Amino acid sequence: MPTSPAGDLAPLSGSTIVFDLDGTLVDSAPDLVGTLNFLLAQEGIAPLPLDEARPMIGRGARALILQGFAAVGAPVPEDRIDALFDQFIAHYEGRIADESTIFPGVLEALDVLKAAGARLAVCTNKRTGLSVQLLETLGFAAMFDAIIGADSAPAAKPDPRHLTTAIAEAGGDLARAVMVGDSVSDAGAARAAQTPLVLVSFGYTETPAAELGADILIDHYDELVGACASLLASCPPPLKAL
C-alpha cells in the first residue's frame, strides 16, 4: 500500500473506524452460502448459485435463510425458522472459514490506521461469538478494540444504537468516527447516527453500493486510509484531557 505523508494521517489520531464484517472485511459468502445450501439439500432442494445468494448476506443468518428459501419457491413457515436457524449456526461454526478470505489490502490498511492513532471496531449483524471466531480463525481479531455483533447491541443495524454501541465499547467518540460498510444496513446506521460513511463497491448488497449515498465509495482498501482521513479532517478535534 502506498504510504502517505505524515500530515495526511493527522486527522486519524483519536478517531474510531468502525467496520462491517461480512462483505466488508471478509469475503465470507462461500461459507455462508454453502451453509444455506446445506439446509436446502436437507429439504431436497437444489443449491442456490453463489452469485445469486451473495447479495442476500448482510442482515444476519435468519434473514439469509428466509430469503434463500423464498428464492427457490419454498418459503419457511414461521414455526420452522428457529430449528433451521439452529441447524444453520451449528453447521456454519464447523466451516466458518473453510473458504472465507480477507479482502485484499485490509490488513495493510488496518495497520496504517492503528499506527496513526485510530481505534478499530467491528459492528456486524452476525452474532458476536461467530464474529470473534471468524476473525480469530483468519488471524486478525486482536487488531480490533471492540467486536459487537447484533446480540451485543440494543438493536441490529440499521438501528444507529448498534453503531454507537460499537464506538463506545471501543472507547471512541461518536463525533470522530467513520463507518465502513457495504450495504443498506450500514448506510442506514451511519446516517441515523450522523456518522461519515465509506462504502466498498465489492461487498454484499441488493442495492448497488453506488446508490446508497456514501460520502466516499472505494473500490480497494488502498483507498481507505485516505478516505477516512479526508472525512475526519472536518470533524471536531479529539477532546484533550483536563
Image (spheres, helix red, strand yellow):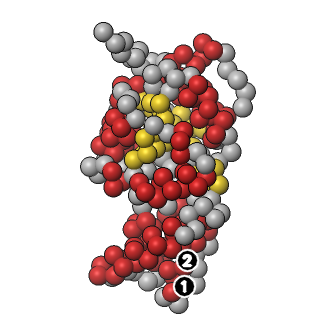
Element at label 1: helix
Q: Residues within 10 Å of mark 2 (few under 14, many from 20)?
A: many
Residue beneath the point at 40% across and 35% down: 170
Closer to the camera in the image, 75 or 136: 136
State which quadrant residue 32 falls in: bottom right
- Where's the N terminus, which quadrant? top right
- Residue name at image x 58 percent, y 68 percent: 95
Horizontal side, residue 5 vs residue 237: left or right = right
Whether 70 is drawn above or below 21: the answer is below
Disc count in the image?
2
For residue 205, say whether it is visible: no
Q: Pick the residue in front: 108 or 226.
A: 108
Q: Residue 51, position in %: x, y?
A: 62, 66
Confirm or deny contact between disc 2 and disc 1 (CB under 8 A): yes
Vertical order, 116 against 197 (above or below)? above
Can residue 141 be seen by looking at this rendering? yes
Q: Amino acid at mark 1?
A: Ala
Q: Quadrant of residue 239?
A: top left
Q: Which residue bears the numbered disc 2?
A: 37
Q: Position of residue 240 (x, y in %)?
A: 36, 12
* Residue that appears at 64% across and 39% down: 107
Percent of width and height locating residue 65: 44, 72
The disc placed on residue 41 is 1
Tag of residue 176: none
| Extreme residue toward the right, this view | 2
Which part of the image, by quadrant, shows the C terminus? Answer: top left
Whole-percent x and y of residue 162?
A: 34, 45
How dense is the environment of label 1, judged by Cα within 10 Å: few (below 14), some, or many (20 and up)? few
| Residue beneath the point at 30% across and 79% down | 78
Q: Secondary structure at mark 2?
A: helix
Specify the quadrant of the image occupied by residue 145: top left
Which residue type does callout 2 highlight?
A: Asn
